[in-house]
Image (cartoon, rainbow, N blue to C red):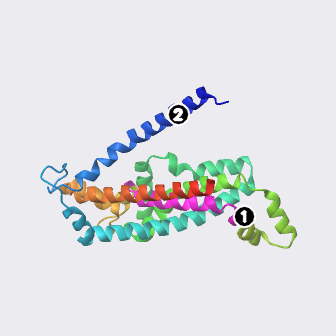
Amino acid sequence: MVDFGRSSSISIAKLLGWAGALFLLLPSFVIIPVSFTTHHYLSLPDEGLSLQHYQNLFSNPLWLGAIGQSLLIAVLAAVLAVITGTLGAIGLWRIASRFGDSLRNLMLMPLIVPPIVSALAFYKAWVAFGLLDSYIGIIIAHAVLAVPYVIITVTTSLSNFDGRLEQAARNLGANAWEAMWLIIVPVIKPGILSGAVLAFLASWDEIVVTLFISSQKIMTLPKAIWNGIRDNIDPTVAAVGSLVIVITLAATCIRLYRQSRVGA
């Protein structure tokens, strides 16, 4: 017997969910028609469509350099954050005490502290260490901001890990490092990969700290977008935003498709 009341409740919930998602996403899609404007300022196309701003994006060394620098910094920062965050999460999981919980909360502070406060702190510290306006300084700062995401995802995976597997490996002669790399890491691999993606996105999107600890020597994509809006409102910014939206939607659709295939 079909429960029509429950089915209708689920349908209404799905409808409200999609309505909420569209409410949040639709303002972002306004940038797509703006990217095809024929004008040299941000505006909706009223005299036809033009690809000149996309051409400028892929031919202007400033934008290409900004994309390349952002990719390099984000990848290196994500690698550093994954290594640090994974080791930290495993270490805190082993401690399993009030001290470990307090230390975990301390490591999650970059998510709580306002970005402007973090930027001021990094600026003062990097001036003292001589890391201001350097790639090493930017990568380390981005990694510090991204570590909490890795800790959260890896800790979540560790919560479902059966500690008896590690004990069995130790009883068979594996040392602590071998047990970690051969037993623990393969099991929590989904959490590590999720943390890597979040760490990459956190670095790719970072702007406040980057503005404080870098000048013209380092030009990431968010910084180039900021300059394009602040100085001359370059419509190329809209082209960049449109490509980011399309890539994000494509990646989301691919992931949903894979999940549906696995579920089937």
User: Residue 236: x, y in percent?
Assistant: 24, 60
Q: Are marks 2 and 1 in contact (CB under 8 Å)?
A: no
Give neighbour class at mark 2: few <14, some 14-19, many 20+ (Cα, 10 Å). few
**Residue 72 covered by magenta stretch:** no
Callout 2 amino acid: Ser
Residue at 38% across, 61% down: 213
Of the numbered discs 2 and 1, the one sitting upstream in the chain is 2
Secondary structure of the residue carrying numbered label 1: helix
Q: Quadrant of the C terminus?
A: bottom right
61 horizontally vs 86: left or right: left
Write down the region rendered in magenta.
185-208
Furthest residue toward top: 5
Indicate the position of residue 16 as horizontal and vertical percent values: 47, 34
Q: Does 76 sit above or below residue 206?
A: below
Residue 229 x/y as whole percent: 24, 54
Give me the disc on residue 184. 1
* Residue 9 numbered mark, or none: none
- Residue furthest out toward the left: 47
Residue occupying the point 18% across, 60% down: 50
**Residue kind at label 1, given as amino acid type:** Ile
Magenta residues, dominant SS class? helix
The residue depicted at 24 percent of the width and 58 percent of the height is: 228
